[in-house]
Image: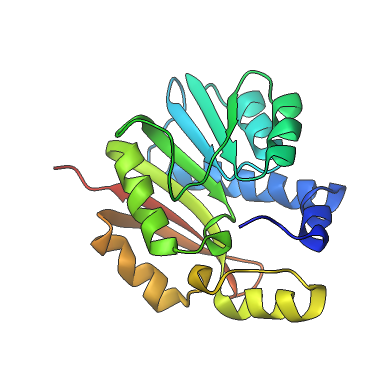
Amino acid sequence: MRLNRAEFLAMNNPVRRLLLRSEFRRAISMLHRAGVSLTGATVLDAGCGSGYSTRLLLAREQPGRVIAFDLMPEQCRRARRAAPAAHVFTADLLTPPLHFSSCDIILSFGLFHHLHDWRLALRQCHGLLRDGGILWMQEPHKDATRVLSAVLRFEFPRGGEFCWPEFRGFFHTAGFELLEERMIWLPWFRCFLLRKAKH
């Protein structure tokens, strides 16, 4: 779903960029520990927002191709300015206009809790990845999204809420193997590194 004004402002400021730098470093460290190289890879930045994560990816790694999309056209305009070398477009992860098995790696910095069906989103990521492809994502527990809604007036769909056992438990159902899970700051925020099972 679209960000409301409060979250749009929160996602487009220096504090969020600082947090994204930390999240990006964590993602790359987890990929490297798993023996995954981004060099020459086709990488999708799903829910790219303002494109800051896309910019970091292009500046610090050597991917072969970077694809990035966001549901909000105003965010995509920012992303195109931030990362002109990436192919940026407006899209929804629940109905991605990309070919089956077209990506080697998908990065997602806090997208799934914004979607009306996180289970479908995981299945879509599975379809977009080649066999053995990698999904890295950072997400909040439903208790965190409810606090953010109450205190900061952010808005999240009920279909994007999950607790860790239910979220983790669906990975295998969606066709993924969990390689690593790490806590961020507080138990409410975690990141996950998954590999698409080979047929």
Residue 132: in sight, yes or no?
yes
User: At 64% from the left edge and 50% from the top edge, which residue is drawn?
Assistant: 23
Front in this rendered view, residue 72 or 129: 72
Q: Position of residue 31 (x, y in %)?
A: 45, 42
Residue 86 vertical placement versus 17 (above, below): above
Count up the numbered dots. 0
Q: Position of residue 71 (x, y in %)?
A: 60, 45
State left or right for residue 74 relative to residue 170.
right
Front in this rendered view, residue 117 or 47: 117
Q: Position of residue 169 (x, y in %)?
A: 32, 71
State left or right for residue 38 relative to residue 154.
left
User: At 44% from the left edge and 51% from the top edge, which residue is drawn?
Assistant: 94
Residue 8 vertical placement versus 40 (above, below): below
State left or right for residue 116 relative to residue 48.
left
Residue 171 falls in which quadrant of the image?
bottom left
Front in this rendered view, residue 74 or 54: 74
Front in this rendered view, residue 174 or 198: 174
Q: Quadrant of the C terminus?
A: top left
User: At 55% from the left edge and 57% from the top edge, which residue is drawn?
Assistant: 138
Residue 50: in sight, yes or no?
no
Q: Residue furthest left?
A: 199
State left or right for residue 186 relative to residue 34.
right
Q: Quadrant of the N terminus?
A: bottom right
